[in-house]
Amino acid sequence: MSGQTVVRADDEDLPALALLRYRWRADEEGESGRTLQEFESEFRAWYTEHRNSHSAYLSIVDDVAVGCAWLFVVDRVPGPGRFVRRAGMLQSVYVRPDLRNTGIGTQLVRFIIDEARSRDLDYLMVHPSAASFDFYRRLGFCESGKVLELRFA
């Protein structure tokens, strides 16, 4: 989509990040429990506590935030050959429903892939929804056969 840009979010972008997250989880998924105002307040506190491990990114079209995603970086246990080992997890990728399939999500995820490479991460993983597997495969993600999960929630 022309006129679209992707930026790394900062403190000034917290209202837009909270609104996009709220729209997705509450409006689209039916999650309840907090009003938008309550969520934004608690989200701001969460962001303050997690800013060293979680970087937020926004897709902007005509000066309006229309999509977001997060890069969670975790330090891994050092090894003798590669002492600094870090991995990334792509989280909470979201594009407004009326703008899906326009290239916004692709540009957003490619931006984060480039960011992960520039940070010299060992790998970037994602837990896609069933509907988004093909999207991530087109961007180079593949099933590794190395991940197992034990779900508690």
Image (spheres, rainbow, N blue to C red):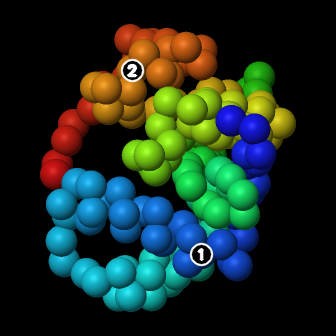
The correct choice, above or below, for 118 with respect to 15 in the image is above
Q: Which residue is mark 1?
A: 14
In the displayed structure image, the side of residue 147 where residue 51 appears, left or right: right
The correct choice, above or below, for 41 with respect to 16 in the image is below
Earlier sequence position, callout 1 versus callout 2: 1
* Quadrant for the N terminus in the image: top right
Question: How far from the left and from the top, in percent, is residue 8?
Answer: 74, 57
Question: How far from the left and from the top, in percent, is residue 143?
Answer: 43, 13
Q: Quadrant of residue 3?
A: top right
Task: Tell me, yes or no, if residue 152 can be seen here.
Answer: yes
* Residue at horizontal 69 percent and vertical 77 percent from the top: 11
Q: Label 1 is placed on what type of residue?
A: Leu
Q: Quadrant of residue 128?
A: top left
Q: Which residue is mark 2?
A: 133
Q: Label 2 is placed on what type of residue?
A: Phe
Task: Tell me, yes or no, if residue 78 can be seen here.
Answer: no
Residue toward you, 138 or 73: 138
Question: How far from the left and from the top, in percent, is residue 28?
Answer: 27, 55
The numbered dot on residue 48 is none
Mark 1–mark 2 Cα distance, whole angstroms, equals: 28 Å
Looking at the rendered structure, the secondary structure element under dot 2 is: helix
In the displayed structure image, the side of residue 18 where residue 77 appears, left or right: right
* Residue at horizontal 28 percent and vertical 26 percent from the top: 130
Looking at the rendered structure, the secondary structure element under dot 1 is: helix
* Residue at horizontal 50 percent and vertical 30 percent from the top: 101
Question: How far from the left and from the top, in percent, is residue 91?
Answer: 48, 46
Residue toward you, 153 or 25: 25
* Residue at horizontal 17 percent and vertical 48 percent from the top: 152
